[in-house]
Image (cartoon, rainbow, N blue to C red):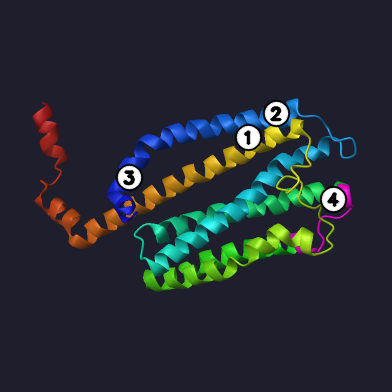
Amino acid sequence: MHRFAKPSVFLKLTAPILPWLAGATAMLIAAGLYFALFASPIDYQQGDTVRIMYLHVPSAWMGLFCYVGMAICGAMSLIWKHPLADICARATAPIGATFTALCLITGSLWGEPMWGTWWVWDARLTSMLILLFLYLGYIALVNAFDDPDRGSKAGSALALVGAVNVPIVKFSVDWWNTLHQPASIVRMDGPAVDPSMQLPLALMILGFTGYYFVVLILRVRLELNERRIRALHLSGMFDDTAQDAEPYDPGHNAEASQ
């Protein structure tokens, strides 16, 4: 896989993929929002409040998905020195943190009318909050060192250690007696959600996943281009070009135009 991790190969492969992926993501999210807001039924107990689920559940899924991806990239960076692994991990962290924060916010908005409180310190909510702190800790740690390599190693180690929280988040409702409802989609006996609600959920989950990959590609491409510019500056190429160029003389241009 190292040949696919070369910056030039990555830029070449992602250039034609990006517009198609962005278009598919936009269509998935638009279709998911339509079905979530207009075509799906209301819940017989929760009413229209249940529509928060179509943001809350995909955000929770993406918070876990992004952290697993970040931990895998951290392992590849530590063990195999994969060229793009560290860049992908750094690019994933703020995306995952945003999804996790959105999950907590929508959960509070959903919990207040259902539970009568904005927050409870039960296992699922607390472990999800810890996941957000792990994201923020990773972001702070990789930027805390003057030497980028030291920051990358420290951040990768934190990502791997924090990965133990992912199964805790997933199975917390099964291991402990929590206020949060048990798993209703990924179950051994099949989903407990009505089929009419499964379609918008699936569309939103796919749309959020596509959004993650679109933003990831954009952030990685931006970082690669910034590193290339820094390397050119350090090599003196820009300075040499500026010295060889003819100085700009507005008077000379005015005479030439006359």
Q: Which residue is mark 3?
A: 11
Q: Position of residue 27 (x, y in %)?
A: 56, 29
Badge 4 marks a residue whose secondary structure is: helix
The magenta segment: 114-125
Q: For the C terminus, which image quadrant?
A: top left
- Identity of the amino acid at label 2? Phe
- Identity of the amino acid at label 1? Leu
Say whether disc 1 or disc 2 marks the residue closer to the N-terminus.
2
- Identity of the amino acid at label 4? Glu
Q: Which mark is residue 35?
A: 2
Image height of 202 relative to 216, above or below: above
The mark lying in front, picked from 3 and 1, is: 1
Q: Which mark is residue 112?
A: 4
- Mark 2 neighbour class, 10 Å CA radius: few under 14, some 14 to 19, many 20 or more: many
Say whether disc 3 or disc 1 marks the residue closer to the N-terminus.
3
Say whether disc 3 or disc 4 marks the residue closer to the N-terminus.
3
Decide which of 93, 203 is in the foreground and name it.
203
For image coordinates 53% across by 35% down, the residue present is: 25
**In the image, is 239 to the left or to the right of 35?**
left
CA distance separating discs 3 and 1: 28 Å
CA distance separating discs 3 and 4: 46 Å
